Image (cartoon, helix red, strand yellow):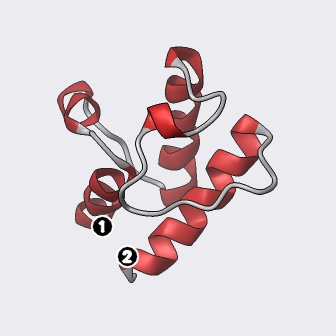
Amino acid sequence: MSKESVLIRMQEVIKDILDLDQLELNRELTAQDIDGWDSLAHINIVVGIEREFKCKFSLAEVKKLKCIGDFVDLIETKQ
């Protein structure tokens, strides 16, 4: 699976959770850059991504995520 396809699938999950129809992700974005991405949304997004990609993340892995690109790379390692 390419990084671009992971990003597109992630974008759909996050758009649904945050109810942001116009959201366009890129690798450099952080949670602070995205409206509505707070600590509760973060948990929902992680769970949603785990369901979408049928994988599990450890707390240590989630803590290391600094930007969308890190999330994409982590998902790619799980595939």
Q: Which mark is residue 3?
A: 2
Marks 1 and 2 sit apart, C-alpha to C-alpha, by 7 Å
Q: Position of residue 44 (x, y in %)?
A: 58, 29
Q: Which mark is residue 4?
A: none
24 displayed left or right of 73 = right
Q: Position of residue 10 (x, y in %)?
A: 55, 58
Q: Secondary structure at mark 2?
A: helix
Q: Residues within 10 Å of mark 1 (few under 14, many from 20)?
A: some
Q: Position of residue 9 (x, y in %)?
A: 58, 66
| Residue 42 seen in this snapshot | yes
* Residue that label 1 marks: 76
The answer to the question of whether label 1 and label 2 lie on touching residues, with beta carbons closer than 8 A, is yes
Q: Residue at x 57, y 29 (%)?
A: 37
Q: Secondary structure at mark 1?
A: helix
Q: Position of residue 28 (x, y in %)?
A: 36, 56
The one nearer the camera, 15 or 55, is: 15
The one nearer the camera, 23 or 8, is: 23
Q: Residue at x 31, y 39 (%)?
A: 57
Amino acid type at circle 2 is Lys
1 displayed left or right of 16 = left
Q: Nearer the viewer, mark 1 or mark 2?
A: 2
Above-or-below relation of 25 to 64: below
Amino acid type at circle 1 is Glu
Q: Residues within 10 Å of mark 2 (few under 14, many from 20)?
A: some
Quarter placement of the C terminus: bottom left
